[in-house]
Image (cartoon, helix red, strand yellow):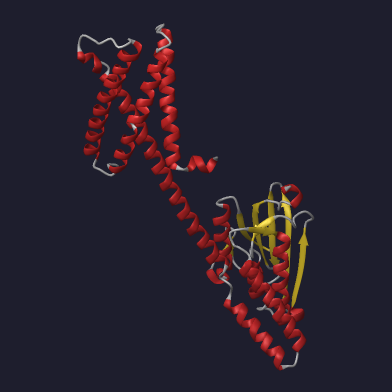
């Protein structure tokens, strides 16, 4: 039903028919007030049918002159409305004299066109409604095209941001695998290749437009950290603290990975003794709070953001993605960790994954 109403041609025939049907009802009710005979119903029906029929050519004429200049278009509409009004009036009065007056003839033939001003008004009203509806449909179509183009650009931006995998990560991982092969650590190298494959499969096949449950993001984070653990061994310590019930919370895919990558780069790789990364998730009212904290040297912060651009593209990338997905309903803030280090806090609306039972 909805698709049928979206068809513009079908819309015309429905509105065209309803309009003339309404005209017939109003005319017949008016005849009852004037206490005319029942035969007038036939006259009203014929008048409305003729009006329905005679205005159809207007549609195809207006389609052809749609792009004419305004003054030329207005003159053509006035001329067409007047000509059709005169024809319609003459036939209406002929029906009136032949059917309602049983073949009597008026003394003056001008009586056949006595209602032309009224008919002209009806034709102009029909034309005004046609152009008004057509302009509205055109504006809606342009608006829909604009929204579609905006959405496509929005999706392209999100995909570009999401697929900015750090080439240094791949380079370091492949180097680590090569080193493991050279020192005959084939089993460890094989595990690392498997985890890298799983992580890349996850990152490439998850649509950046759709959100995923937090538990899937934690799974991807663990894959990434297991790869890095092979490189840093005991120098990298990881702790997860997920509040019960947050596992099904929907988050942007790979939203944690660039934050963890930054923590490894600035808090683990830069220190001889390595460092610890803590990933936390909890609910706060109608929001989900995510936190990635480290015990590294930290950095200078101003108004919740790093003072310099030395933090890399990870934070900028993450903020742009959150802005594209949640507009202004999010927060990304950097704070100092205690006793040392950096914390990255994200607040997004809490949206829970719907289970199969809820769908049913």
**As rendered, which of 247 and 133 lies closer to the eye?**
133
Horizontal side, residue 281 vs residue 50: left or right: right
**As rendered, which of 333 and 303 lies closer to the eye?**
333
| Residue at (72, 72) in percent of width and height | 223
Horizontal side, residue 244 vs residue 34: left or right: right
Indicate the position of residue 124 as horizontal and vertical percent values: 30, 28
| Residue at (73, 70) in percent of width and height | 222
Asked if residue 64 is positioned above or below residue 239 in the image, the reply reads above
Question: Is residue 338 shown to the viewer in this render?
Answer: no
Indicate the position of residue 61 as horizontal and vertical percent values: 29, 39
Q: Residue furthest top?
A: 35
Indicate the position of residue 217 as horizontal and vertical percent values: 69, 64
| Residue at (63, 67) in percent of width and height | 205
Which quadrant of the figure has residue 29? top left
User: Total label count?
Assistant: 0
Asked if residue 94 is positioned above or below residue 129 in the image, the reply reads above
**As rendered, which of 59 and 170 lies closer to the eye?**
59
| Residue at (51, 41) in percent of width and height | 4
Indicate the position of residue 110 as horizontal and vertical percent values: 20, 15
Question: Is residue 124 shown to the viewer in this render?
Answer: yes
**As rendered, which of 43 and 12 lies closer to the eye?**
43
Asked if residue 110 is positioned above or below residue 297 in the image, the reply reads above
Q: Residue furthest front?
A: 103
Q: Quadrant of the N terminus?
A: top right
Horizontal side, residue 154 vs residue 77: left or right: right
Which quadrant of the figure has residue 40? top left
Asked if residue 334 is positioned above or below residue 46 in the image, the reply reads below
């Amino acid at each position: 039903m909805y698709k049928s109403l979206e068809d513009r041609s079908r819309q015309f025939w429905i509105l065209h028919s309803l309009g003339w049907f309404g005209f017939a009802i109003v005319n017949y009710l008016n005849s009852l007030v004037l206490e005319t005979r029942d035969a007038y119903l036939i006259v009203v029906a014929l008048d409305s049918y003729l009006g329905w029929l005679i205005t159809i050519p207007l549609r195809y004429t207006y389609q052809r002159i749609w792009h004419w200049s305004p003054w030329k278009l207005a003159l053509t509409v006035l001329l067409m409305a007047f000509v059709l009004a005169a024809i319609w009036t003459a036939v209406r009065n002929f029906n009136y004299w032949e059917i309602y007056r049983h073949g009597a003839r008026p003394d003056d033939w001008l009586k056949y066109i006595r209602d032309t001003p009224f008919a002209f008004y009806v034709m102009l009203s029909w034309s005004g409604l046609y152009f008004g509806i057509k302009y509205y449909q055109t504006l809606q179509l342009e608006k829909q095209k604009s929204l579609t183009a905006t959405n496509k650009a929005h999706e392209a931006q999100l995909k570009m941001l999401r697929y900015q995998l750090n080439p240094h990560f791949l380079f370091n991982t492949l180097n680590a695998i090569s080193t493991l092969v050279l020192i005959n650590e084939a089993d460890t190298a094989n595990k690392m290749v498997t985890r890298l494959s799983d992580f890349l499969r996850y990152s490439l096949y998850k649509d950046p437009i759709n959100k995923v449950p937090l538990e899937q993001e934690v799974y991807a984070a663990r894959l990434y950290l297991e790869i890095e653990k092979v490189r840093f061994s005991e120098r990298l310590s990881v702790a997860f603290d997920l509040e019960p019930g947050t596992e099904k919370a929907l988050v942007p895919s790979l939203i944690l990975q660039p934050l963890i990558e930054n923590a490894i780069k600035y808090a683990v790789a830069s220190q001889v003794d390595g460092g610890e990364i803590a990933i936390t998730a909890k609910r706060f009212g109608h929001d989900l709070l995510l936190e990635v904290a480290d015990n590294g040297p930290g950095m200078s912060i101003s108004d919740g953001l790093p003072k310099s651009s030395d933090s890399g593209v990870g934070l900028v990338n993450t903020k742009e993605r959150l802005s594209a997905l949640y507009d202004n309903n999010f927060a990304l803030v950097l704070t100092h960790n205690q006793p040392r280090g950096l914390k990255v806090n994200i607040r997004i609306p809490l949206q829970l994954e719907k289970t199969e039972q809820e769908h049913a």
